Amino acid sequence: MATMTVSLPDPMKDWIEAQIKTGDYASSSDYVRDLVRRDREQKDKLTALRRLIDDAEASGISPRTLDEVFADARARARKRGLLNE
């Protein structure tokens, strides 16, 4: 595993130390690794969302009405357990 030295302002250092004291992290390295993992996951999700938006824009205008689009979205959300109406 590689080593990296990072300089932080005191308030950031204090914050990291406080996170370690909660017991959720064993060390500052553990905390930073978790932050990097979460950042990568967030960027991957954002990239996927942007791809969906680009694909949707490229597909053109739908012949369906707005009510039909929303009804379909609600039905899909219900099927996935994301919506309880």
Image (cartoon, grey):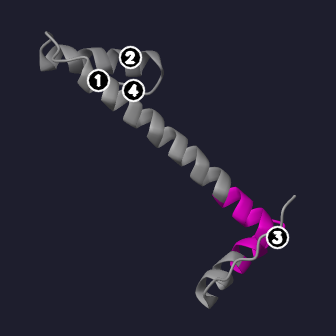
> In the figure, residue 27 lies in which quadrant?
bottom right
The residue wearing badge 3 is 27
Q: Is residue 51 left or right of residue 56?
A: right
Disc 4 packing (10 Å; few <14; some 14–19; many ≥20): few
Looking at the picture, which amino acid does disc 4 mark? Leu
Disc 1 packing (10 Å; few <14; some 14–19; many ≥20): few
Earlier residue among tags 1 and 4: 1
Earlier residue among tags 2 and 1: 1
Question: Which quadrant of the rendered structure holds the N terminus?
Answer: bottom right
Magenta-drawn segment: 17-35
Q: Is the magenta stretch mostly helix, strand or loop?
A: helix
Q: Is residue 8 left or right of residue 59?
A: right
Q: Is residue 85 visible?
A: yes
| SS for callout 1 | helix
> In the figure, residue 82 lies in which quadrant?
top left
Looking at the picture, which amino acid does disc 2 mark? Arg
| Disc 4 versus disc 2: nearer the observer | 2
